[in-house]
Image (cartoon, rainbow, N blue to C red):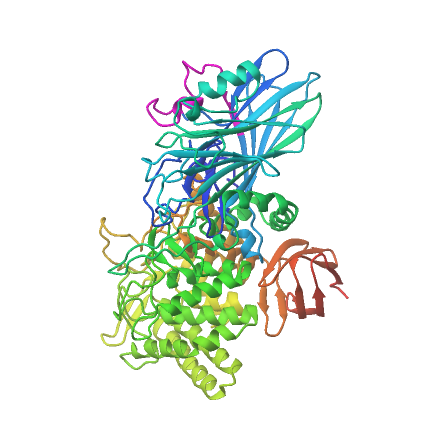
Amino acid sequence: MTEQIFTDNNGCRNSGMPLGGVGAGSLEIRPDGHFHAWHLMNNRPWGAGAATDAMEAYGLRFGLCADFGDGPRCLALEKNLGQDPGLDGWFWFSDPYHLPWVEHAENIDYQANLPFAKLDYHFADMPLEISLEAWSPFIPGDAAASNTPGATLTFTLTNPTESNCRVTLFGLLKNVVGYDHTEFPSRMTVLEGATPGLVCTRAGLEASATSQGELGLFAVSDAPHASCYALHPHSGRDLWDPLRATGTLENVDFALEDGLTGQLGALSNAGPTGMPRGAYGMGIYLEPGETAQITFLLTWYFPNFSELDYRGKPGKMIGVQYANRFTSAAAVADFLLKEKARLEGNTRAFAAAFYGSSLPEWELQAVMSGLSSLWRSAWWDKAGRFGIWEGLGIGGLQTVDVAHYSSLAILQFFPELEAAQNRLTAANLEPSGKVPHTMPGNFNCCDTYDGRGHIELGAQYLLAQWRYARWTGDLKEAEKLWPVLQNNIAWLEATDNDGDGLPNNLGPDQTYDRLPLYGTSAYVGFLYLACLRAAAELAGWQGQSVKAIEYRQKADRASATLQEQLWNGEYYNLSYDVVSDSTNNGCMTDQLNGDWYYRQSCGEGLFPDHRVRSALLAMVKHNRRGAGHHSWLPNCTWPHGGGIEVTRRGSDQANCPWSGVEYTVAAHLTLLGERKLGREVAHAVFARYEDAGMRYNHVENGHYYSRATSSWALYQAEFGICYDARAQELSLRPPAGNANFVITLPGSVARCHIIGKELSLMVINGKLNLRILNLRGKQIAEEVRLNVGGELVIDILG
């Protein structure tokens, strides 16, 4: 590939890097310097509370006053959005009549390497160097730390001149607590001590309200400093006038000045209604050549997370997982400060290992940005149940056919969350025992009741249990669910109404619910074949040899029937109906999904490599549309004529691309040695979303669609990472030559370097216990036992 379209800013102008915790709520920071898309107050579409755009762009912003001795300069650390003066928030930093002295950044250099974003602010003729690094804990193997409801915002200030400089940096935070009950007065409290800052609450708000909670902004510095604040100011002049005159905020609650509240600092404080603001800042002196840091902590505590009502099932208050560890916004800030070395060290170690991988920069961005739904769309309740929205607020939670694509990253990063997802499905089986499709905004129900629905769900669910057992070594989950898994195989077998050993589709009855498939289909057929192979292995692990033989025999028959009915010499036809003896010769992009999942999970394919490779290459030849990085893979084409009629009012699933599927196709190609073509497919996906400014927001059925989390499969395929925890065997197939990459396994994260004739493994989290280590099909080590910091160096040519 000769062209890279990656740029620092372009892909994030409409979708920024997420901050927050997995299942704890989130917001985004974008290249304009503003914080967007706040979904942390249990508000829709993330939660069940009322939808609101109250915090969009203007919910949190930062300003700075700098004086080198020749008069103050007032700087807004953001781009001027130039919005209507009537909009809330405009006049605080952007009023050209009352605040002509407030300068907005002329340019912001933005670099997002999830989970870290770096912003460098540039102002005309301003010598002070100003940058921000924003991040939240994300530590594979540490789900609790990765669930922290907060973000660390570290500003670095450098004085390159020969003059002293006085600087006051402040954050202006809107009190969004009780955003749907603004008739109750605002309460703001300034805290002192080890974690000084500002906490927003609301007086008189019902204790059970979903918007009840706390929002905090805290600040610390490594330099001598003095804190300052302004609570409930009326306008930007209550901030900027004192800064220009004295270099600091006035330490005043303007609600007290207006007679609206009691003694400052008392818990009975109550300010004006609506959503007023509070500012908290820190003043420092910078000597010539000196650099200092001021760190702000944005934290939140909204424990009253509720479900949505669904078909007579009233939503219950289910709480949030982080409420088991924290009791306030201040407690979150204390944790982030006290555990800073560990949290930042482990987060940075994973990021450094990942972004140090020997892959093109665009590919690393594509892989990591595909994971955004972990932050944006996950529910993790107080009882430990876990699910991810199909699309943010759309479809449902733990949608089995979508999780089939997206869950590899969850398994490798946080296996306990993958287990919780699977248990959630099992807890909501249909009365017949059939695996449900999804939980529609409610952890206590499913969206179908004994209808035919999607017929492939049982196969996908069994594959998830098999992969979990293989990669974690834990067979208990599968053993508990073994009756459910067998029942769903039997349910699939019952759809074989022509007796050929394969399930039969009766229309749009699978994840492509706009594609009417009839009879044997490649998509469901290969999934069923993979399911039988996996079921045979699961039975064998449990000592059920008779059952294992039965499933292997059924798999052998299914394999022969698939080949006979669907192979056309180039690819596998979309479907074949025995009853009418009719073939639909559509070329489906996802025709070999079952082989991809099975191959990615255990390193072996369902069919010989040459046959699978041939079908994939034919699919790309026939299906790829456009050219270069403007190409895409529609879900199905009919290269030999035919096709289906698509209405404009419905979802055009045939002609449009699902990025989550394109990423699995790219991974599948790579696993079969077609690395160049795999990268071309993935590069086109990344370019499409970069051009739209939506790097972190993939669209399918709704926004932030979780199928795109399959991007992690591409990374695994690039280095051929495959693991069998039961045998403690790790296999690696990186490209020839030197290579750097990160290995994420349930229970450990390791950095791998291959340089010349040496391979080194360094554990950066957890512990790595192996009996066998294979490289490109050759065993190179055995009995590897490494804890954090442990390193193994092997002569791979010896």
Q: Is residue 230 above or below residue 344?
A: above
Instruction: Residue at 47%, 55% (x, y): give it.
Output: 321
Can you tell which quarter of the image residue 212 is in? top left
Q: Is residue 105 magenta?
A: yes
Q: Is residue 543 left or right of residue 780?
A: left
Q: Is residue 66 above or below residue 318?
A: above
Instruction: Residue at 45%, 18% (x, y): give it.
Output: 237
Q: Is residue 784 left or right of residue 395?
A: right
**Magenta residues (range):** 82-108
Can you tell which quarter of the image residue 762 is in? bottom right
| Residue 114 appears in view | no
Q: Is residue 776 magenta?
A: no
Given residues 237 and 65, the one toward you in this image is 237
Magenta span main SS: loop
Q: Is residue 404 above or below residue 41?
A: below
Q: Is residue 352 above or below residue 268?
A: below
Quadrant holding the C terminus: bottom right
Indicate the position of residue 308 as horizontal and vertical percent values: 31, 54
